């Protein structure tokens, strides 16, 4: 089974509670959860004025195809109250499929690896915590290399090192 990596974020309501519940629901799928990063508090990037996010990354193995996994992530978001009103707006939970094995794909509904992964400190820092040597398909670079190429991530602050305990 291929390794998949997701980014998790929340900036509305019980932020940590939404992220915990998203992982708990994901574990009910044909998924074997691996590492879960520490939790970071980050300033929003783009979009309207809004509160800070909690962000993390997780890795798992799954028999679901990339498109099926994306659909399931979106179903979990909807079940946890995510409403898509505006691009980069506030949300109860955001689940982004970042990397799926060595898959490179560009479709209207899914791009792998995630197209803005290398630009987002709030993704790169937690991803580095769980998979520093992960080679991002199509880039020829590891997560550690991508982090090293970025300016210092001042808007990404450690919030809680250990926050998710498996169901």
Image (cartoon, grey):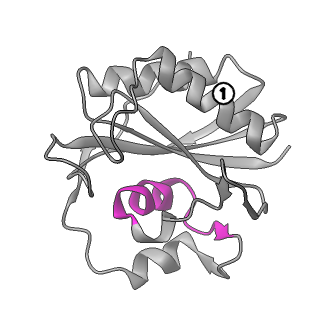
Residue 55, image x and y in percent?
A: 36, 44
* Residue 73 on the magenta span: no
Q: Quadrant of the N terminus?
A: top right
Picture mark count: 1
Q: Please name whichever residue, 126 or 93, is drawn nearer the observer in this view of the structure.
A: 93
Quadrant of residue 19 in the image?
Answer: top left
User: Is residue 4 in view from this perspective?
Assistant: yes
The residue shown at (67%, 31%) is: 71
What segment is highlighted magenta in the picture?
120-136
Q: Is residue 143 left or right of residue 123?
A: right
The residue identified by callout 1 is: 72
* Residue 135 on the magenta span: yes
Quadrant of residue 94 in the image?
Answer: top left
The residue shown at (50%, 64%) is: 117
Q: Quadrant of the C terminus?
A: top right
* Dot 1: element: helix
The correct choice, above or below, for 62 with respect to 27 in the image is below
Quadrant of residue 52 in the image?
Answer: top left
Q: Please name whichever residue, 156 or 106, is drawn nearer the observer in this view of the structure.
A: 106
The correct choice, above or below, for 145 with respect to 35 in the image is below
User: Is residue 160 in view from this perspective?
Assistant: no
The residue shown at (39%, 64%) is: 120
Q: Residues within 10 Å of mark 1 (few under 14, many from 20)?
A: some
The residue shown at (26%, 20%) is: 14
Residue 95, image x and y in percent?
A: 50, 38
Q: Is residue 120 left or right of residue 65?
A: left
Residue 92, image x and y in percent?
A: 34, 27
Q: Please name whichever residue, 162 or 59, is drawn nearer the observer in this view of the structure.
A: 59
Residue 132, image x and y in percent?
A: 54, 66
């Amino acid at each position: 089974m291929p390794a998949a990596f997701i980014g998790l974020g929340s900036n509305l309501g019980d932020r940590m509670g939404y992220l915990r519940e998203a992982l708990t629901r994901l574990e009910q799928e044909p998924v074997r959860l691996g590492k879960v990063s520490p939790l970071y508090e980050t300033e929003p990037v783009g979009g309207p004025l809004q509160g800070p996010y909690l962000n993390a990354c997780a890795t798992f193995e799954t028999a679901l195809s990339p498109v099926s996994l994306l659909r399931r992530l979106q179903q979990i978001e909807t079940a946890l109250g995510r409403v898509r009103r505006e691009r980069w707006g506030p949300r109860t939970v955001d689940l982004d499929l970042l990397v799926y094995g060595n898959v490179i794909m560009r479709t209207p509904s899914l791009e792998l690896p995630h197209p803005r992964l290398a630009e987002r400190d709030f993704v790169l820092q937690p991803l580095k915590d769980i998979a520093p040597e992960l080679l991002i398909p199509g880039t020829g670079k590891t997560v550690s290399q991508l982090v090293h190429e970025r300016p210092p991530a001042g808007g990404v602050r450690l919030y809680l090192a250990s926050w998710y305990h498996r169901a």
